[in-house]
Image (spheres, rainbow, N blue to C red):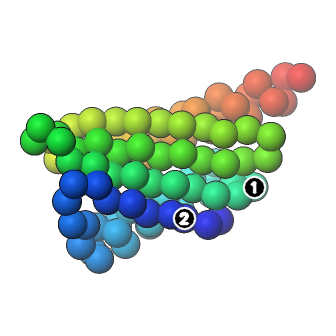
Amino acid sequence: MNIEFTARHFHASDKLRMYTENKVQRLKRYFNRIIQCQVVLSYENNQYTTEINLSIPKRKINVKDTTDNVTKSIDRAVSKMAGRISKFKEKRNEI
């Protein structure tokens, strides 16, 4: 899986970058055919927003979460993405 990391309106430390990449790598447990993952962290109005864009065959899945803590925002976005992937797999298996 190719991971692209972007921080907007603040400087993300290497520690935060590694934390994010480790969390996103866990999505492979749910679906092992992930092609690309874009993670965008932004800071506006004392709020951190995490946006995860996932490319899988024939589909793109997007998730966005905003909190006042950057790691909390990352955790919640990854959790939402895991739920969306599970939902996608269920729908795919029904067909």
Q: Which residue carries the number 2 mark?
A: 3
Residue 89 lies left or right of residue 36; in this view the side is right
Residue 11 place in picture, x, y as percent: 21, 66
The residue at 76%/25% (across/down) is 91
Q: Residue furthest left?
A: 46
How many residues crowd mark 1 within 10 Å: few (<14), some (14–19), many (20+)?
Answer: few
Residue 81 place in picture, x, y as percent: 51, 40
Dot 2 or dot 1, earlier in sequence = 2
Residue 51 place in picture, x, y as percent: 41, 43
Q: Determine the CA span between mark 2 and mark 1.
A: 14 Å
Q: Quadrant of the C terminus?
A: top right
Residue 5 lies left or right of residue 27; in this view the side is left
Secondary structure beneath dot 1 equals loop
Q: Which residue carries the number 1 mark?
A: 33
Q: Amino acid at mark 2?
A: Ile
Image marks 2 and 1: residues in contact by CB distance under 8 Å: no
Q: Amino acid at mark 1?
A: Arg
Secondary structure beneath dot 2 equals strand
